[in-house]
Image (cartoon, rainbow, N blue to C red):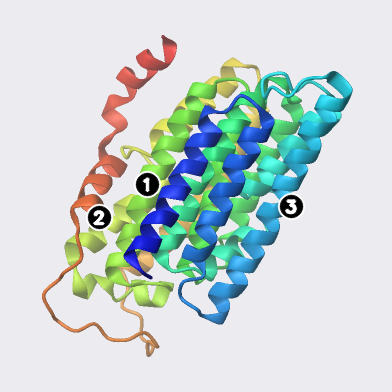
Amino acid sequence: MNPYVLTILLSSLGLGTVLTFASSHWLLAWMGLEINTLAIIPIMAQQHHPRAIEATTKYFLTQATAAAMILFASTTNAWLMGEWEIHQLSHPLATTTVMLALALKLGLAPVHFWLPEVLQGLELTTGLILSTWQKLAPFALMIQVAPTINSSLLVAIGLLSTLVGGWGGLNQTQLRKIMAYSSIAHLGWMVLILQFAPSLTLLSLSLYIIMTSSAFLTLKTNNALTINTLATSWTKSPTLAALAALVLLSLGGLPPLSGFMPKWLILQELTKQGLPLSATLAAMMALLSLYFYLRLCYALTLTIYPNTLTATAPWRLNFTMITLPLSIITILALGLLPLTPAVTAMLAL
């Protein structure tokens, strides 16, 4: 793609998200979401591969549907209650419709079916943008409307997403689909605590972005798209393979890695709010996700696959990819747990 065109598209992507962040009016927020969607579509379709075009079409249709639902809900609220402000969303029909629309935009269960299919058709860099940056604008709106949404609906969507994210990833061999189901499960944890402690949702989102970026950049560096290809990456870079295994365990939420921090604090907060059953179910569903992360770690570090690979064999050439972002993000993905007391003190302010 032409660098000037790519610069315009990435600038529009940033503009759309910032516009949604800054808006207090539903029409402006909707406009930001639309700019965001229209900017990423050419980036998704740049490969000119049939699978990429199919993924782009699916993404466009789901995002357009969600945007239409948001517009419908905000217009309904303005008609019935006379308010266009995001904070003044009060009619039950409007709040439920907006919640479902934002769930569709994010890929939360039960409207998650597009996410694995779309992510599977994209290259890893575009998949990284879709899994991280594209979640920010809908989450900003969801945090603003959360106080008016029925808490039982939020808890149900959160628990269902953690279940679907764990269960769906069990049988996958494609790494991009596994990352998609991992995304669904993490988003479920964020929605689960959204109404009780929005600051914890922001903490979880930040750490999710760090860990997912580290995982995607590792896969990009190893040029791995399937578990079988991942199993050969230790011959290319043993250090990176060991760190990748730790990043996957961090995504699973194992101590003493960074991913344990949000799960720990969320379970603690749910228990304080008198929801021990929800906390128990969420913790048990996290075990499903942990299983497929452990499966990836096993393939990455402990096995040599005895089958013929269809992937191209890498040449032993000088490595030209910039690895500084990967190094920084991997350190953050592994070593932030000791900062938990400082984080809890900041959240208490």
User: Which numbered disc flags the more N-terminal residue, 3 or 2?
Assistant: 3
Q: Is residue 167 above or below residue 251?
A: below
Amino acid type of disc 3? Thr
Alpha carbons under labels 3 and 2: distance apart: 40 Å
Give the residue at mark 1. 211
Residue 288: image x %, image y %? 55, 52
Amino acid type of disc 2? Leu
Per the image, label 1 sits on a secondary structure element best described as: helix
Q: Nearer the viewer, mark 3 or mark 1?
A: 3
Q: Nearer the viewer, mark 3 or mark 2?
A: 3
Q: Is residue 196 above or below residue 45?
A: above
In the visual, does 251 lie left or right of 25? left
Q: Residue furthest top?
A: 349
The circle on residue 243 is 2
Give the residue at mark 3. 65
Q: Residues within 10 Å of mark 1 (few under 14, many from 20)?
A: many
Front-lying residue, 147 or 35: 35
The circle on residue 151 is none
